[in-house]
Amino acid sequence: MGTDTETKRKQSAVKEKAPLRPVESPMDICLGCGTCSAGCAMTGVDGFDPRKIVRKVLMGRDAELVGSKLPWICTMCGKCEHACPMGINIVNMIRTLRGMVDRDKVPGMIQKGVELCLETGNNLGLPAEDFTFIIEDVAAEMAEEPGFEGFTVPIDKKGANLLHTLHNKLVNTQNEDLVHWWKIFHMAGEDFTIPSENWEGVNWGLFSGDDESMKIVVGRIVEHMDRLEIKNLMYPE
């Protein structure tokens, strides 16, 4: 059986790890007004309610939240904390709760996607040669359309104005959305490029509360910017 000190430390974990937006203000200033819940699109879905989550954190009921599916219902859109009159950083609270969940208990494909991204550079686990084939094939189809003759996608172009990281769905199941972007770039005369490796623009480490993985993915994008001498980034999320 743990000591009272250990119990208190565990109970206050989320309060300590998820500071408020105005750092000077303690989380205990929550008014219980429900403004966060009123602005949340997920309120009522399977019992989700931002106000109740804040209150449970204040009561030290972290273990109850970590063991539930409530933190994963949140879309992390930020409407709740934007509406909060006291500035409580509810999104950071949700991320902190997610980060306290054992990785083998993270729901769905999120953790698998994180592991694939760390290993292969994208959440799909798509080999670099397959990625390049898809990009070139979709570009070739676009080049057959009137007004886009000869269009190609520059890959790993040094000195381009814009680095375009990609949402994995654009490569996997929604290729047509790639064409929409490329047509805009082409008509605007935009000088862009796509990295051939570590091209993933969806940081599932961020969503899952895995800070270390999140930093690795962000670091890869920074490396692309430095290596290719690019100043501007287009991020899909």
Image (spheres, grey):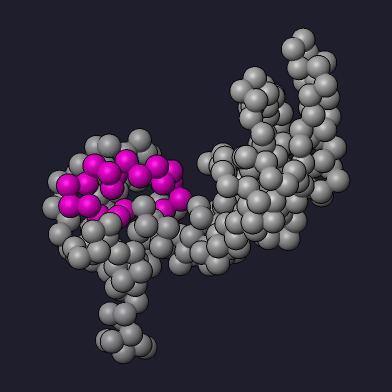
Left or right of 14, for residue 99: right
State the count of labels.
Answer: 0
Q: Is residue 99 magenta?
A: no
Of residue 84 and residue 74, the one placed in the foreground of this image is 84
**Quarter of the image where the N terminus is located:** bottom left
Percent coordinates x, y for residue 215 in the rendering? 55, 62
State which region is magenta: 71-90
Magenta stretch: includes residue 75: yes
Percent coordinates x, y for residue 73 in the rendering = 43, 46
93 or 130, nearer to the observer: 130
Q: Is residue 236 left or right of residue 23?
A: right
Residue 79 falls in which quadrant of the image? Answer: top left
Residue 75: % across, % down: 43, 43
Which residue is depicted at the point 58% across and 47% down?
A: 231
Residue lying farthest top? Answer: 146
Question: Is residue 111 at least partly visible in the picture?
Answer: no
177, 229: nearer the viewer: 229
Q: Residue at x 50, y 52 (%)?
A: 207
Picture coordinates of residue 123 (x, y %)? 67, 50
Q: Residue at x 69, y 45 (%)?
A: 159
Res. 157 in view: yes
Up-down relation of residue 48 to residue 114 (above or below):
above
Which picture quadrant has residue 95? bottom left
In the visual, does 32 lie left or right of 141?
left
